[in-house]
Each structure stands twice: as C-alpha cells, then as structure tokens.
Image: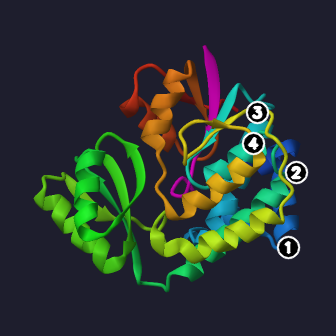
Amino acid sequence: MSSIFVFPGQGAQSVGMGKELYENNAAARAVFDEVDDALGEKLSDIIFNGPAEELTLTANVQPAIMATSIAMMRAANATVPEFVAGHSLGEYTALCAAGAISVGDAAKLLRVRGNAMQTAVPVGQGLTAVILGLNIDAVREICAKTDCDVANDNSDGQVVISGARDVVEATMAAAKEAGAKRAMPLALSVPVHCRIQAPAADAMRAALENTNMVTPIVPIISNKTCTPLTDVDEIKDALVYQITHGVRWRESVLNMANLGITDMIEVGPGAVLTGLCSRITDKINAKKLEI
C-alpha cells in the first residue's frame, strides 16, 4: 500500500484560486511571491483578480496552476508520499513538489513552455477537442485516417485530440459518425500535445538544458512512459517528448494500481484528476488534499 500526489494541468484554473491562502498562510504567500520574483511581474495579481481572459492565456495559466498547487501543498504542510505525477504541465509541479526543481525555475520553465506553445502555431490555425463516448482504440483508428493526434487519453470514453484546425474538425465529424456522444472544441488558446508543436519542443529542450534539475526525492510517474522515473536525463527527455505526444493518463493510473498505489491525493485547483481516477479504476481511492 502506498500513496501518490497528483497535480492538475490546464483547465483546472479559476480566477481567485489561492487568494485566501495567500492572505492567511505565510508558506503559501512565499510561493506566490517567489513566482512573481522569478517572472519579474505580478502574476499573482492576475491569478487572484483576473480578468479570466488574461489568466487563461497559455503563458500565464501554466505557471499559475503550478504556483497555486505548490502553495496548497505547503499551506497544508503536506509531506510528499511515495510517488508523484502530474497531468501535462502538472509534471513540472510534481517535480517541484519532489524537490527536483525550485518554484522559481518551475515558473520560468512553464512561462517558456506557454510562450513557445503559443508561438509555434499561429492563432486560429490549431484546435484541441474532446471526444466523449468512444474508447481510445476507436479514436486512434479515426485519427490514423484523418492524420490527427491524440493529445490526452484521460479515461475510458474521454479522449482529447489536437492538431491543425481543419484536421481536428474533420476528426470530430468522423467521431460523431462513429457514435461519439459528444465531440466539442476545448477553450484552449493553443493546440496541445501534437506534432505541430515541434518548435515548442525544441524551445523546451534548450530551456531544460539550462535548468538545474536534481534527482527527485520520490519517483515521478511519467506521462511518456507511465512508469516511475528518477533519472534526470530521462525526466528531461520525457518533458520534451510530451510537448508533441499525448498524455497517457489512463494508462498511468492503471499502472499506479499495478505498483500497489492505493491512495491518490490531488493537489491543486479543481478536482479533475480525482474524477478521472474513479472512472479508470476502483483499486485507488482518490481525494483532494485537505488544507
């Protein structure tokens, strides 16, 4: 029996997240202040007060979710358990929680990541969408015909696709014809985890080469391999890889169960990962971190 901290990705954000912690908890306040100092701007003001349109910009929302998640963990004075994992950008938060990178470096990396993803694909040319009611094999079969990419294998019946706008729209139509309950675009400012993000992967490779990363105190279950990693070079390679390849979250959770993990604690805004876990396996008890 063992436990894991999991950290959410883009979409978990809301204006005002972490504000009460900032005002009432010194450890949480220090996290937001460190992020502001690292970025040279008051990202915390956007997190706490909006507007929502500015918070949801990829370059802002990625460090914002990381900051809020780490602030919650430190406000709770929580000890990292046997494993950590994160969904997409949540991997950076997980590495920060496990002591592999500092809060400031995580913020800088995620700002680079967000900017690089935004500039890799001109506005309006890419699209990300969710397919509900088809399993991963069915979606992959459709994507093979339309030349679309699977961005997230989240749970049985929830698969995210991404790529050029016309390709994604064609894939959504094909999915509906194949019996999908719903196929709808997601409110993201960039297409995620797809081949057309190759320039962003190059930018992240360069940024990670210049970042001091040490061995995490506990293994991170990787979006790339679905297995625990501790080697710094392997972790950096996986972080670059996930820019252009899909997040294998369903497989990762199933492997958590195979590793004997019985308790999942979601650390961060929202409860997306807790909900997904309940649809993936009944062998893991998932809940939010209590603060």
User: Does residue 63 sit above or below 2 in this rendering?
Assistant: below
Magenta-highlighted residues: 1-18
Mark 3: which amino acid?
A: Ala
Q: Which residue is mark 1?
A: 40
Which quadrant of the figure has residue 186?
bottom left
> As drawn, is 146 to the left or to the right of 162?
left
Q: Nearer the viewer, mark 1 or mark 4?
A: 4
Residue 76: image tag: 3
For mark 1, give the secondary structure.
loop
- Residue toward you, 219 or 233: 233
Q: CA distance from mark 4 to mark 3?
A: 28 Å
Q: Which residue is mark 4?
A: 231
One can see residue 135 in this view: yes
* Place of residue 112 in the rendered image (x, y in percent of width and height, measured from the top left): 71, 71
> As drawn, is 195 to the left or to the right of 230?
left
- Residue toward you, 130 or 141: 141
